[in-house]
Amino acid sequence: MSNKHVFDDAQLLEPAGKAAFARGRAYHAEGRVRLSLQTPDALKAEALGSEVYTLWLKRDGGKWR
């Protein structure tokens, strides 16, 4: 999958919250995040932590939720 979506920290920090954002950043740096769906308005990924976490981002107007 191509990387069409580029997010800055603020776009991800707001919907995730500080603690989840920090864990997600660490998981990504360790290569434990897999993108499984990508459309212009939605992303789905799995983060491999103590269990498998499914993550959804959906565009709502101009913001990602």
Image (cartoon, rainbow, N blue to C red):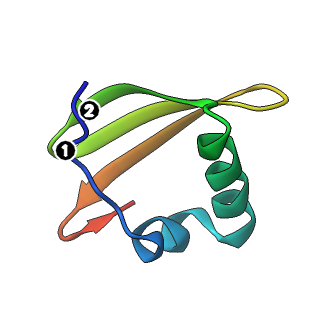
Query: In this image, 51 relative to 62: left or right?
Result: right
Q: Secondary structure at mark 2?
A: strand
Q: Residues within 10 Å of mark 1 (few under 14, many from 20)?
A: few
Q: Residues within 10 Å of mark 2 (few under 14, many from 20)?
A: some
Q: Secondary structure at mark 1?
A: loop
Residue 40 found in image quarter: top left
User: What kind of residue is marked 1?
Assistant: Lys
Q: Which residue is mark 1?
A: 4
Instruction: Mark 1 and mark 2 in contact? Answer it, CB < 8 Å.
Output: yes
Q: Which residue is mark 2?
A: 38
In the displayed structure, 42 sits above or below 9; it is above
Q: Residue at x 69, y 71 (%)?
A: 18
User: What kind of residue is marked 2?
Assistant: Gln
Q: Position of residue 37 (x, y in %)?
A: 32, 26
For the C terminus, the quadrant is bottom left
Q: Residue at x 31, y 50 (%)?
A: 58
Q: Position of residue 20 (x, y in %)?
A: 69, 58
